[in-house]
């Protein structure tokens, strides 16, 4: 990778969602700084939907289309796209994700400044769709005093002690080498695979936090994420699979980071974590960390403590400790 010329690959997964396809591709190809590679993976859509995908794809000569032989699941689709990706950084989005026209320009600026970072993450919002309009449901801000800041894995864990730092897939790029050498997108983690891979890469190589809202996740009935979270049995299996991974020897640094920064796992999984780990005594220390972390957050002033203030406090504390 050239530090002055990073490249970006986008993997967009699609399954019977052609009503969002044209808009999704238009947002990606309409960037002020175009992506270097756009891969559309159709995960075995119905024949009539596949015909629409083909017609829409013909409008974009640079679009690479990967056809799954059947509906194998979103993680398998993402990994099929990853096999074709060649960019230094990879993003994995849904066809209905909304992104700002400046998304790739900001990502390029961050990658040039910090080419070895594992993750580049922008602020991301969550919205519902009503009558064709986006209605805000959840707004997440980093609270940075500048719009770009690099944090090491240790700093990220320390931040997660006091507040949740959301690395949302729809607003994130992961360094491909970090993804391939780490946990990757594991099929047994299903709807949780992207979150797990992002935090693993950020823990090992650090993350660039871009303090601008550049993406919006669309929460809608019938979407993959909504259905997955509503299935308690499936959620429990997925969470237990992740907890099993955390117990592996090679996962020690991630396990330590999540215990040090319990806001991450607590916010990502909520009560589902409690239901999954209740009968697993080996995971009780992690549950205790999450519970204690919520108490610490309230004592420190709630969930919106600015990240920049926390980082500056840590830096000042290190300077005081070094003073004779």
Image (cartoon, grey):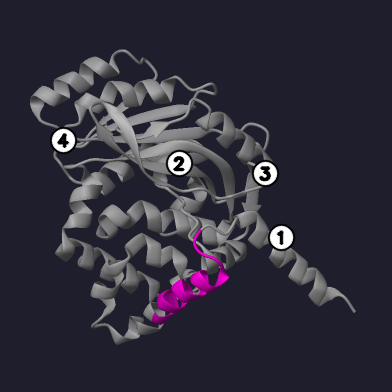
Q: Badge 2 local density, few (<14 within 10 Å), some, or many (20+)?
A: many
User: Does residue 50 appear left or right of residue 126 in this picture?
Assistant: left
Q: Residue furthest bottom?
A: 281
Let me know if residue 163 is in the magenta part: no
Residue 255, quarter of picture: bottom left
Q: Badge 4 local density, few (<14 within 10 Å), some, or many (20+)?
A: some
Tag nearer the camera, 1 or 2 = 1
Dot placed on the residue nearer the N-terminal end, 4 or 2? 4
Tag nearer the camera, 4 or 3 = 3
Q: Residue at x 62, y 59 (%)?
A: 152
Residue that numbered label 2 is attached to: 171
Residue that numbered label 3 is attached to: 146
Looking at the image, can residue 184 be seen? no
Between marks 4 and 2, how big is the CA–CA gap? 26 Å
Tag nearer the camera, 2 or 3 = 3
Q: Badge 1 local density, few (<14 within 10 Å), some, or many (20+)?
A: few
Magenta part, dominant SS: helix
Residue 245, quarter of picture: bottom left
User: Does residue 244 appear left or right of residue 174 in this picture?
Assistant: left
Q: Position of residue 249 (x, y in %)?
A: 44, 76
Tag nearer the camera, 4 or 1 = 1
Q: Are marks 1 and 2 in contact (CB under 8 Å)?
A: no
Q: Are marks 2 and 3 in contact (CB under 8 Å)?
A: no
Residue that numbered label 1 is attached to: 312
Residue that numbered label 4 is attached to: 44
Let me know if residue 296 is in the magenta part: yes
Dot placed on the residue nearer the N-terminal end, 4 or 1? 4
Task: Work out whether residue 91 or residue 157 is closer to the camera in this orientation and state it.
Answer: 157
């Amino acid at each position: 990778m050239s530090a002055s010329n990073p490249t970006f690959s986008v993997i967009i997964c699609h399954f019977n969602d052609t009503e969002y396809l044209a808009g999704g591709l238009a947002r990606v190809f309409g960037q002020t700084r175009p992506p270097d590679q756009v891969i559309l993976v159709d995960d075995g859509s119905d024949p009539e939907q596949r015909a629409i995908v083909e017609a829409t794809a013909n409008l974009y000569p640079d679009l690479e289309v990967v056809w799954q032989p059947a509906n194998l699941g979103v993680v398998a689709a993402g990994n099929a796209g990853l096999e074709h990706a060649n960019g230094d950084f990879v993003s994995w989005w849904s066809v209905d994700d909304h992104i700002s026209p400046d998304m790739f320009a900001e990502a390029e600026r961050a990658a040039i400044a910090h080419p070895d970072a594992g993750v580049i993450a922008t602020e991301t919002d969550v919205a519902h769709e009503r009558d064709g309009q986006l209605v805000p449901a959840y707004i997440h801000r980093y609270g940075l005093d500048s719009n770009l800041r690099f944090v090491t894995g240790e700093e990220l864990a320390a931040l997660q002690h006091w507040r949740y730092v959301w690395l949302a897939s729809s607003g994130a790029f992961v360094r491909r080498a970090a993804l391939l050498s780490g946990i990757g997108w594991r099929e047994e983690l299903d709807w949780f695979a992207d979150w797990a891979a992002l935090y693993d890469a950020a823990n090992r190589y650090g993350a660039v936090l871009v303090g601008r809202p550049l993406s919006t996740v669309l929460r809608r009935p019938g979407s993959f994420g909504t259905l997955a979270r509503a299935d308690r049995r499936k959620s429990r299996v997925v969470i237990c699979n992740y907890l099993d991974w955390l117990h592996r020897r090679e996962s020690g640094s991630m396990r330590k980071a999540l215990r040090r920064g319990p806001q991450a796992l607590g916010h990502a999984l909520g009560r589902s974590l409690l239901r999954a780990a209740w009968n697993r005594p080996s995971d009780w220390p992690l549950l205790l960390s999450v519970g204690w972390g919520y108490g610490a957050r309230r004592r420190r002033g709630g969930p919106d403590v600015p990240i920049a203030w926390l980082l500056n406090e840590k830096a000042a504390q290190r300077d005081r400790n070094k003073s004779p």
